[in-house]
Amino acid sequence: MAKKSKSKATKIINYARSPTLETVQSVEKFIEKHSGKYNRTKLWRKLPKGIMWQTYIVILNYLKELKKIEIDSSENPIFKIIKKETIEEKIIEEQLKQEQSPKPLPSYVE
């Protein structure tokens, strides 16, 4: 018996999923809340909305290409990436708060 082979186009259609914007945003928010806690399989199982595995993988690849997430190669947890500008803004904000707070007088001044 001859095996029926599927064309490449059929395989791509079967595996390619187009997530909606709402689905991408919900996955991104979930990753942000649970950054570093789960690997990709556990994260997928914990998602509040049922998302097909193939769709989920497409979303992860999309977020990774945008450099919004990173997957740790050792244990494979998924991390939300904080942009460098955001970190610098937080540091500057903390420094300004410290400068504005009244400093205690030295102990020899009363």
Image (cartoon, rainbow, N blue to C red):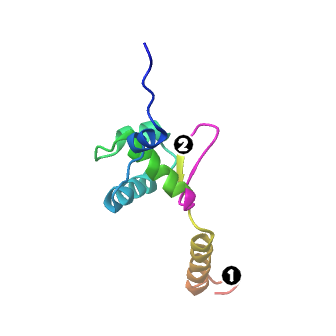
Classify 62 as above or below 15. below
Residue 107 percent location from the top left of the image: 68, 79
Which three-letter amino acid code belongs to the residue tagged 2? Pro
Report the disc number at residue 106.
Answer: 1
Left or right of residue 109, residue 8 in this image: left
Classify 45 as above or below 61. above
> Neighbour class for label 2 at 10 Å: few (<14), some, many (≥20)?
some
- Magenta stretch secondary structure, dominant: loop
**Foreground pick, 91 / 46:** 46
Residue that lies at the very extreme toward the front in this rendered image: 2
**Foreground pick, 2 / 38:** 2
Q: Range of the magenta residues?
A: 65-76
Which three-letter amino acid code belongs to the residue tagged 1? Pro
Residue that lies at the very extreme toward the top in this rendered image: 1
Residue 26 percent location from the top left of the image: 35, 56
Q: Which residue is at a point 57% across and 85% down the rendered structure image?
A: 102
Residue that lies at the very extreme toward the right in this rendered image: 108
Is residue 70 part of the magenta span, yes or no?
yes
Residue where numbered disc 2 is placed: 77
Residue 92 percent location from the top left of the image: 61, 79
